[in-house]
Image: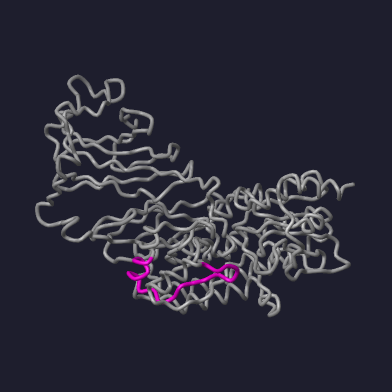
Amino acid sequence: MRLVQTVVTFLLIGIFVVGCSAKEASNSNEDSELTIYTSIYPFQFAVEQIAGDTVTVNTVYPPGADAHTYEPTSQDMIELSESDAFIYLGAGMEGFSENIASTLDSEDVKLIEMGQYDELFNGEKSHEEHDHHAVEDDHAQKVEIVGLSGHYHTGDSINLTAKIEESIDYDHLHWFTLNPDDEEWVVVDGQTSDEFEGEAEVNGQQIKAELYGEDHEVVAKSEPITIEIDDHGDEEHSHEEGHDHDHGDEEHAHEEDHDHGHGEEEHAHGEGHNHDHEGEQSDRPIEIDGVLGHYHTGDAINLTARIEESIDYDHLHWFILNPEEEEWIVVDGQTSDEFEGEAEVNDQQIKVELYGKDHEVVGESEPVTIEIDDHEGDYNPHFWIDPLRMIQAADIIKDELIKMNPEQEEMYNENFEELKEQLTDLDDQYLDVLSTKENKAIIVSHAAFGYWEERYGINQININGLSSAEEPSQKQLIEIINQSKEHNIDYVLFEQNSSNRLSEVVRKEIEAEPLTIHNLSVLTEEDIDQGEDYISLMEYNLEILDQITK
């Protein structure tokens, strides 16, 4: 009866029978204690490495299937209903998996939805009481650098802050820089606090912070951030004598009654303080540095007002304007050139105004916009291409395996530590190879490799979107071709489990050679026959990246 109910429910939710499918190679053992199914291959790999012969594990994908378009068969559902657990991505990223989970909800099958763990996608720790960033892991990201501007002009001040988790125990820290043509990181003399101050001099310079224990061993370090210098050229941003930024009336229309709508209740500096801008300098002598490309809700906002030395002012105030409001509101208690806040409202604008002793406005910045992207329903699902995120995923899976089979806790923990070491070594290999590259632009068939951008500085030019079904418009396709030419790209990367018509169009247009990169979502028949696994395929990918980057 249990089996009949499962099949009937499966048919009712509209997933059609398309015939039986072959399974990828599995860790099959008649004496195993558990039977587990997974969606993507990396989950299967983690189970195999941690549980060994105590589990029979299969993936629902046939060899070489496109994970974005695959639909399970009725036979798949029958087998799943008889298993002990189903590990899947979910969270809006695998439509078929959520259908499966819904169907199996009434069955005695443990459902493990990996997509609910935000730290796999944004790097934050949220797996309940479990610490997936153990201090002994040199690469644990307990240090985050904030304050990076989108770009700098030559000579601009660089003001960064190392945001350090309270749980980490360290004795002191050092800042390091790495210039594009250098191979060795250089310690920054005299900077041992969590605040970094420098000057933008070298485009592409990387900066990182490392924390040390009393024995001078590294206990944690940040991801490197990159300083991008864009002086815009003479026609865009001339820093010549006089600093003439003529924006024209259409850009900065300061009407005669331009009072910014602060109102007496919002910004009461006494009688007569009406924010009259008659004395305001129109050449924008103030710029706001430190705004990030996007924030997550609750992230710290750290901004700096960069004020020209020539401007004479007495005090300043910061203001915010929320999207649904018409009037700017003064930020209480923030009267220095440093702004500290919290990301709470998407598209909130922030600006700073300078005042003379007579409370007249003598200058104001352009507003900056705070963009909040919590990735809800729009996560990049391909976290498994980052070895450190794979450690986090494996840790979660290990904990679930222990709950299901507590008698094997010691073995599972030991096997996890071995896997963690392998994945950390793999990350080291990627860092060693890619840190020496200057041109890391690659063109790929779809946006599966964004975590390489974040971790290793790869510049992914993707033809399709996060799903292989998200095709670009004609205009976007032209832009992709232009970008490829600008970056002198010699290769177009195809993936092991899908053909891409538009990738071939781009390849021919830029006269590039085709190569295959492995997205690891599924194994092919050839992978299985040759005994490939996550580690060997990631090492293959690194060889490809080494070949095509410069």
Residue drawn at x 26%, y 64% as measured from the top left? 201
Does residue 376 appear in this view? Answer: yes
Q: Is residue 162 above or below residue 205?
A: above
Quarter in which the C terminus is drawn: bottom left
> In the shown orientation, is residue 502 left or right of residue 154?
right
Q: How many marks?
A: 0
Q: How is the image coloured?
A: one colour
The residue lying at 55 percent from left, 54 percent from top is 121
> Which quadrant of the figure has residue 507?
bottom left
Q: Is residue 65 left or right of residue 500?
A: right
Residue 296, percent from left and from top: 48, 45
The residue at 68%/80% (across/down) is 530
Q: Position of residue 144 (x, y in %)?
A: 46, 54
User: Residue 249 in the image: x percent, y percent?
Assistant: 15, 39
Residue at 22% across, 59% down: 232
What range is drawn magenta here? 481-500
Q: Is residue 387 above or below residue 276?
A: below
Magenta stretch: residue 507 in it?
no
Say if residue 211 shows up in the picture.
no
Instruction: Indicate left or right for 516 with 341 as reference.
Output: right
* Residue 134 % position (x, y): 61, 59
Foreground residue among 293 and 144: 293
Q: Is residue 484 magenta?
A: yes
